[in-house]
Image (cartoon, rainbow, N blue to C red):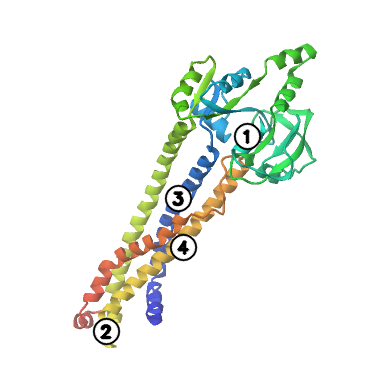
Amino acid sequence: MLSGLRLAWRLLWLRPLATGLNLLLLALGWGAVAFVLLVGEQVEQRVRRDLAGIDLVVGAKGSPMQIMLSGVFHLDTPTGNIPLETVQQLQQQPLVAEVLPLSLGDSLKGWRIVGATPAYVDLYGARLQRGRMWTAPMQAVLGAEVAAALRLKPGDRFAGNHGLGEGGHEHGDQQFEVVGVLASSGSVLDRLVLTDLASVWQVHEEHHALDDSDRAALAAEREVTLLLVRYRSPLGAALLPRWVNAQEGLQAAAPALETARLLRMVGAGREVLQGFGLLLLLSALLSVFITLLAMVRERQGDLALLRLMGAPARRLAALVGWQAVMLVTLSVGVGLGLAHLGLAALAHWLSAQQAFPLAPDFFSPQEWALFPLGLLVALLAAALPAWRALRADVTQLLQTPH
């Protein structure tokens, strides 16, 4: 058995250029398929995690997709602000179980500062790694990624920037105190700076007010940016969005519907990449088939010699099959390595952009399915060449000029 494997390995690399090219084509095909699998599975897991417990997002009139992206994933700018009274109106609705207000508008070196209530942290089941939750305005709790990137800890102070991106005007006269750091939860909280709603109001009222009368006027007109709503019963999904959309200046976005639309758009790109990978695999399969068939023809003298030395015909067919299995199995391993390198590079780039996060060390159980699939590909590629070797006649092989 071992001698047969060693012989098959040597025969495989008698033509190193052709073998290397086939290995590269196969590895690229497997890598493309695995990369799409790894990224797609992570995106779906992150989306489900961030949507946990959120039935409806309410914002200012505009695009429901934009409201959902800004309110749930914090990947877009909000459509505007809505009156604070909207919170009380929704809380009084019998179909509503909970309303979580969010206020956006500032950031810390690109990381978003979000005014919220402690219930927003409880929504994702997050826990503190260090420090405590905020108990007063101008206190902040950092997500795990924010604290790691900015190297902030409880007791440190920082000033936010106006706007949701880097480069905005710094509110240097309004300093936040870090009072806690959240443990990594794999949710959107990891990328946020959380504070009290009153903190956001205080920063902007101080920035825009000229005197006490201005501050009083701004306090009377306080707004929030978005509302995350949980239904009390399934009937809320049928009635509440209509009621919200009928109100002046309000827009409802159902995360389930908008996410389905988003995943369909992402799915189209995934299908293109998967199709490209499968095309590469098909091309490589054809190339492996041609290489093995040519090897059987070119090594007829060696095959005849092996037969004369007592090797059964099935051993010659096994040599061809083992070469295909070795080549394809090696290509699957190289392809998975390329896929994980691509995932690590993409995760690093997204982290630098402070965008949708991906885990660079993510492994999917479905990756292992590529090995039996590769074995099937190898057997298909080797079927005809192995059959030719099995049916070869020793007398004809010896009479054929080489």
Q: Tell us which disc is closer to us: 2 or 1.
A: 1
Q: Are marks 1 and 3 in contact (CB under 8 Å)?
A: no
Mark closer to the chain start, 1 or 3: 3
Name the residue carrying label 3: 37
Residue at point 62%, 38% (across, down): 122
The amino acid pointed to by label 2 is: Arg
Name the residue carrying label 4: 333
Residue 187: x %, y % from top left: 58, 42
How far apart are the alpha carbons under marks 2 and 4?
34 Å
- From what the image shows, is residue 246 above or below residue 225? above
Q: Is residue 335 visible?
A: yes
Mark closer to the chain start, 2 or 1: 1
Mark closer to the chain start, 3 or 4: 3
Residue at point 61%, 24% (across, down): 225
Q: Tell us which disc is closer to us: 3 or 4.
A: 3
Residue count near mark 1 (Cα–Cα under 10 Å), binned few <14, some 14–19, many ≥20: some
Residue 355: x %, y % from top left: 58, 39
Name the residue carrying label 2: 307
Name the residue carrying label 1: 120
